[in-house]
Amino acid sequence: MKHHYKKLIILGIITVVIVGYFKFDLGQYFNFAYLKSRQIDFQQFYLQHTLGTIGAYFLAYVVMAALSLPGAAIMTLAAGSVFGVLTGTVVVSFASTIGATLAFMVSRYLFRDAIEKKFSGNLRSINAGIEREGAFYLFTLRLIPVFPFFVINLVLGLTKMKALTFYLTSQIGMLAGTLVYVNAGTQLAKLESPSGILSPAILGSFVLLGIFPLIAKKIITIIKSRKYLRRYKKPSGYDYNVVVIGAGSGGLVSAYIAAAVKAKVALVEKNKMGGDCLNTGCVPSKAFIRSAKMLHYAQRAKDWGFNATSVEFDFAQVMERVQKVIRTVEPHDSVERYTDLGVEVFEGAAKIIDPYRVEVKGNILTTRNIIIAAGAGPFIPDIPGIEQVGPLTSDTVWGLRKLPRRLVIVGGGPIGSELAQSFARFGSTVTQVEAYNCVLSREDDDVSELICEQFASEGIKVLKNHRVTEFKTESSNKIVICEHQGKAVRIECDEILLALGRRANVSGYGLEDLEIHLRPNKTIETDEFLRTNYPNIYAVGDVTGPYQFTHFAAHQAWYASVNALFSPFKKFKADYRVIPWTTFTDPEVARVGLNEKEAQNQGVDYEVTKYGFDELDRAIADEETKGFIKVLTVPGKDKILGVTIAGPHAGDIIIEYITAMKYNIGLNKILGTIHVYPTIGEANKAAAGVWKKAHAPESILKLVKKFHAWRR
């Protein structure tokens, strides 16, 4: 409250000063005619009281600039007229910059919190841009003195630009304009009006001066990118418009789009068409999860009114079914299908010789552009004894034909959690080791707790805050040694499965020789158009990130292929505003946008609306009542900031929220949309109803109550 009163006091003082300025017509002393009529008097006073005049002038200028009062141009002319070019420029430069910085800081203190609260979503992207290039754009604006500087001061105060950055950039950027005005002040006697200072030629010069940094930046970017190309001989013609390396999701979509717009495209794959998703990732894991879920349904027979049921299964047959599913999906990603689409498919390892040439089995393919979609592989940590135990990974686990009696899964992320639950349902004694204090650590605590409770009910032992330090073998047992609260914990098992994330494939096909830039996390560095440091080499999917999802790779592929084929005539910045994902545990966990953890870390204000599946008719009928929908909205508004769904069919029903966020549809519109009864999807409307009830206009409802009473 005290903070609030301080703001009111400051705002009151500023208001009084500004009102006083106009009330007492102080502007009459800051006009061109008055300055010209008193020029000689000011010069004589300055000669008699040099330091006092400079001090008083400096203070007055700072106040005027800080309060954005009119008259700064006249004050600058006065500096040239009275102090001369050198002294005048120094005094005005510092006074104007200090005043502008004060205005910047006052705007920040008085208004930023309120603006951030109301427009948090909009400001996130603005602040991200300010952090990257705010100083550069401030500098270009400062070079143009005809631009209203007070607007710049006030608006940038609402962003997260550092005050020191604002001050130094303004000091340098305003120097050119200050010098022109101060110099004009030395010729005051010859000027008929302020308009004489800025002739069309001078105005044009300032505009060019302001635009120059932007042009220079563009030229530098082009020069930087082209310098890599200059090292290599450009072919006189090309075999292909684009060569795509990798036939996973990102590569397949890139090739598909290129072929669809009649470009000549080559697709190179050294292993299997379809990449990780088809062969070792999404498809086999979901087939495996489905079989495990069916078995779990049988184990829950009493929930649906059956006395008992039993299912006999052969684990080897279950794993063969997984392979059958892969073979069924395989034609969608096959060489034959893509050949029919007009893509030339090369089976073999690719080697990027230079930005224009890719070698495959001794064949040199010349191309205008290259799209790298090389994917990622399981991360194998350097832990003592790891080679002895021969751990499984998400790539190799599908080769199992015998169910492990005791299985240790290292990692509590999505892959580890999905496989932990599925193996437990088949009868393995599963221990999941997690270094953090929860599984699914990217999700909110209530989500993690829900999954942990479910795992405990299914007999899965989750060891939180346990860090693996060593692997051993003893006779036929594999041993996992963990550190927990300073003590060693020993776990015996038959198999170990590592699920510690995936590492981008960035070696073995020429990136090192070309010096293609990598990020600190060893993914390929790309710009907003998905270009590497070579302007004609692009990267998509797991090899560049920032997300490692099949659908995200496909999303990036559209931008990379279109930009590669139509740049420089037309190109598109990749849009990462609404990225959803699902973890296929039971219950499923689906998310889009912010969750509470992220909102708090980013300082975003939010309201939470929560609806439990135990209130939904269809979930009750299906005996699938575990979980909830949690919607984050802008305080007092129905604008959606993010949604987390932990519950049945979460990955399916979150699509409504993805669409809503993509096209700025609020909860009121979802509430006003008919949903089929009884369905799980109806939970979305119910959640919107919870929000509406919490935001019912009480004052209006009281009036309506009186209205109805009157009518009775």
Image: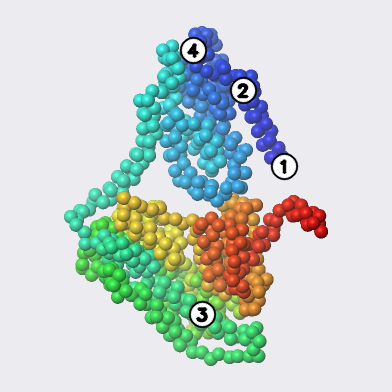
Which residue carries the number 2 mark? 22
Whole-number angstrom distance, CA of label 1 to CA of label 3: 56 Å
Q: Earlier in the sequence, mark 4 or mark 1?
A: 1
Q: Nearer the viewer, residue 469 or 672?
A: 672
Which residue carries the number 1 mark? 1
Residue name at image x 43 percent, y 69 percent: 378
* Amino acid type of the residue that numbered disc 2 sits on in the rendered structure: Phe
Residue name at image x 54 percent, y 60 percent: 660
**Residue 607 visible within the image:** yes
Judged from the image, the secondary structure of the residue bearing numbered disc 3 is: helix
Q: Position of residue 506 (x, y in %)?
A: 36, 62
**Residue 244 visible within the image:** no
Left or right of 253, for residue 482: right
Which residue carries the number 3 mark? 290
Judged from the image, the secondary structure of the residue bearing numbered disc 1 is: loop
Which label number is shown at residue 36? 4
Left or right of 301, for residue 338: left
Residue 219 position by quadrant: top left
Whole-number angstrom distance, CA of label 1 to CA of label 2: 32 Å
